[in-house]
Image (cartoon, coloured by chain):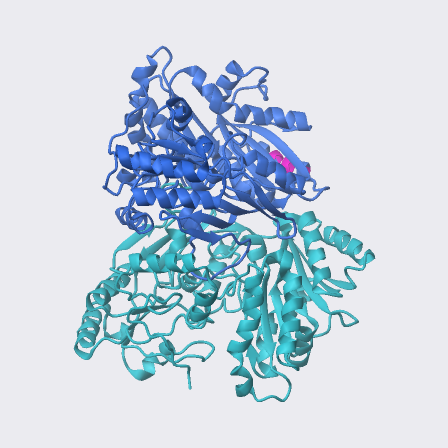
Chain colours: A blue, B cyan
Amino acid sequence: MTASGSTGTALVDALKARLGEAYVLTAASDLEGHVTESRGLYRGEALAAVRPRDRDEVAFVLRECAKAGVPVVPHGGNTGLVGGGVPFGGVVLSLTRLDRIREVDPVNATITVEAGCILKAVQDAASDAGYLFPLSLASEGSCRIGGNLATNAGGTAVLRYGNMRDLTLGLEVVLADGRVWDGLRGLRKDNTGYDLKDLFIGSEGTLGIITAAVLKLFPKPHARVTAFIGCASPHDALKVFQRLREAAGDQLTAFEYIPEFGLEIVLKHWAGAVRPLAEKHNSYALIELSSPQKDADLRSQLEAVLGEAFEEGLVQDAVLGSSEAQSQALWNLRESLSEVQGREGGSIKHDVAVPVSRVAEFIDVATKACEAEMPGVRVCAFGHFGDGNIHFNLSQPVGMDKREYLAQWGRFNRVVHDIVHGMNGSISAEHGIGLIKRDELALYKDAVALDLMRSLKRTLDPQNILNPGKVVSIGENVPMAFPKAG
Amino acid sequence: MTASGSTGTALVDALKARLGEAYVLTAASDLEGHVTESRGLYRGEALAAVRPRDRDEVAFVLRECAKAGVPVVPHGGNTGLVGGGVPFGGVVLSLTRLDRIREVDPVNATITVEAGCILKAVQDAASDAGYLFPLSLASEGSCRIGGNLATNAGGTAVLRYGNMRDLTLGLEVVLADGRVWDGLRGLRKDNTGYDLKDLFIGSEGTLGIITAAVLKLFPKPHARVTAFIGCASPHDALKVFQRLREAAGDQLTAFEYIPEFGLEIVLKHWAGAVRPLAEKHNSYALIELSSPQKDADLRSQLEAVLGEAFEEGLVQDAVLGSSEAQSQALWNLRESLSEVQGREGGSIKHDVAVPVSRVAEFIDVATKACEAEMPGVRVCAFGHFGDGNIHFNLSQPVGMDKREYLAQWGRFNRVVHDIVHGMNGSISAEHGIGLIKRDELALYKDAVALDLMRSLKRTLDPQNILNPGKVVSIGENVPMAFPKAG
């Protein structure tokens, strides 16, 4: 829905008067970065992109847009992977100028930050205060806290520290009508009524605009050890995971899975990557133990568990990173994986989760099903094994036309998501729903849950102006088919 | 609101026909335990108390009550401390027959339990499977999981493991109209839409009836060390807490605060209690470190931090529990504190939280304010110091009439809660709101938050039949003044 001409002009004028001309962009060239998204899957359109400087200006924008009945699509770093930030008319509300670190409270172990702070800047501010802010993901240099909150971001540290929801104590939110809810409290315990905070976290800008948050900090790890193991199957890897969790508890801070195909394409495309083990194995895991205790003997602990697993044949080979450089080299193998897939042609992606007890079974069953669906397809199932979260990506058969392959996206979604659903899993573990999975969600989500979601949306955004058409459709003024980018 | 005669009779008949006569109680003697509560502060009334055997029967009860417009007040163990389970007419829905442990999944580290399971039974089932279910509170032998969920229970393990919300992955909920939301998933990551689960957790039965949950399990601790320290002030205790957290991270599993007055009344009233340190100190802390790692040298870690703090005068004296029996004796000093307060006459209670950075300041300021308010009042401020959660209780002046003293409850609430509010704190850290704090909440909670709560209540319970009048008043058919028990 786009505001009709005169309404739009009046709105833009009102916004310019309050925010200043420089912060209300309407030229096509200025809007370009606000109507496209990171994967190039969609191209939207917008009346204007506005850049308020603080919470009160955000509230002003919301009040004006509510009065005019014009949609508002919030933007942080615009690094999302599900088209959640694509506008179809209306105003793009960029939070990038709200980038202040408002407070670091070292004794409370909290940091209060504005939505526009880049994740890396928050990590750095925590570090400067002697603490760890653990959220870590590939786009941390450009994604922003508001987007991390709106999508309940995950990443590589969830196993030990939880996702963005778990890391958040308080929020400041501007509602659809421009009222401000000040829930910026840094309390570990607060049972005074309904949990409003978690309603906004993960709602992808459809229920309110988060402008600031109080986040948890943790003691910095002072000891760390990394290992890379080769196993005969994901089932063996799962047994090793279980033993490590039992022995090391929360000292186990990563257990990331990489298949042989994944390692192969990293070695092929990533300059300087070296095969870490002498032989090839079916499955690999990157393991990290860490502790705030300076003299924690993590190496002995890890060697003891892996040694025993080796004796029993669960681990076929292993290497321990014995220096910071070696550890980093092992991590690079995992972290370059997302990028190198693009060099192997089309990649059809799934971001799924199953109970950890079924993650190996899921990899097996879904791999066979996809290989049967299209002979030659190359399964690259990798990721946060210890969370049950697998990026089940499918590289195209060698030599196939990329466009023709990508046209099969929906067909593979059906195969993979049916299996996930049958295992009581999730079709979006950490990326969210946005546009790309909205109609897919409607297929798999419990009907009562969908109905509750729609009720909540109607209650908090009765005009349907907050990022309309994303996450869940409530049937009014929502474009049902979204244009894909040319 | 009570259903008028004929509606009530027809409803009771319908419930008897489905649940069986034996499970629909209407005799005054049978209802007695369902219309009173643990502190004896309120006496309510009920048309009937029903005991469905499973989720489908719960759904039936809700459908029938919704049709008849009759309120439903859910009961677990009825151990709550805020009058949340007091019925004012309508049907008490007891969940005690839903007491099955549905599944233990050791690899996923989850347990699926019904709402009527006693907390201790869940702890035991976890332990039998080789795991820890960490929620621990004084009433664990009689409180039930449904109540723990409805009140987002806290307790002594929150510092390390979080509260009930943090321990919950999935829920099954019967809605106000009898529909069932099946959200019983055991996933570590699931970003498919709004977070419905956390809306019901902590809502004290006012938004839906929780019938089952998937809960997280943890590796059992295999090493443990306990210490009892004496400090010159809560400020010194806070500095010790901070150092321990930094050095030991999540191995720090308890940091409980006890003032000298608290220790005195324990020694006076608790058979076998022995003063653990040679001298008296202003403030004490019970400290526990634990680890799943069998050979973790927690004792050296603890001695190192405490030794350094002793050198600097932050710790005046300390004793380490060098056996399981000694540790238990130290814990008993803390755990008997709630009970012995009753032996010192009237006790006016506050369950508050502030940011951890202000907990020592809070104890100081609030103590002085209360002593100024009523000379001779004896402050017993104790509890979960590491969470910023203090049970700021006030024992009556010696010799004062108990009834006369307790009549000052509201006056002291104002003094204490004003201070808490000024520190951006919570007037109910872990006990909830129920009846006793409902009107108090309306004084202190952000107006926008209260309005959001009312909107959510109206959306999820449009007839206002789910535990009406608790937590937040929405103005319809709600008794505004509640009778106190005789």
Tell me: A144 left or right of A304. left
Q: In this view, does B239 lie above or below B86?
A: above
Q: Quadrant of residue A141?
A: top right
Which residues lie in the magenta part? A300-307
Q: In which quarter of the image is the C terminus of chain A?
A: top left
Q: Nearer the viewer, residue B112 or B64?
A: B64
Residue A49, percent from left and from top: 40, 32
**Secondary structure, magenta segment, majority class:** helix
User: Considering only vertical position in the picture, is B94 above or below B242?
Assistant: below
Query: Horizontal placement of A11 versus B134: left or right?
Result: left
Residue at 37%, 53% in the rendered image: B171
- Total label count? 0
Q: In this view, does B129 lie above or below B40?
A: above
Give x and y (percent) for residue B375.
66, 81
- Residue farthest to the top, as pictured: A399
Q: Residue at x 43, y 55 (%)?
A: A195
Please, which residue is most extreme toward the right here? B311
The quadrant in which residue A42 appears is: top left
Q: Is residue A106 magenta?
A: no
Q: In which quarter of the image is the N terminus of chain A?
A: top left
- Residue A21 shows up from this direction: yes
Q: Position of residue A111 (x, y in %)?
A: 58, 46
Depth order, front residue of B100/A120: A120
B263 in relation to A296, above or below? below
- State whether residue A433 appears in this view: no
Identified at 25% across, 30% down, the residue is A481
Residue at the image point whose x is 37% and y is 27% from the top = A35
Q: Position of residue A315 (x, y in %)?
A: 55, 30
Q: Quadrant of residue A83?
A: top left
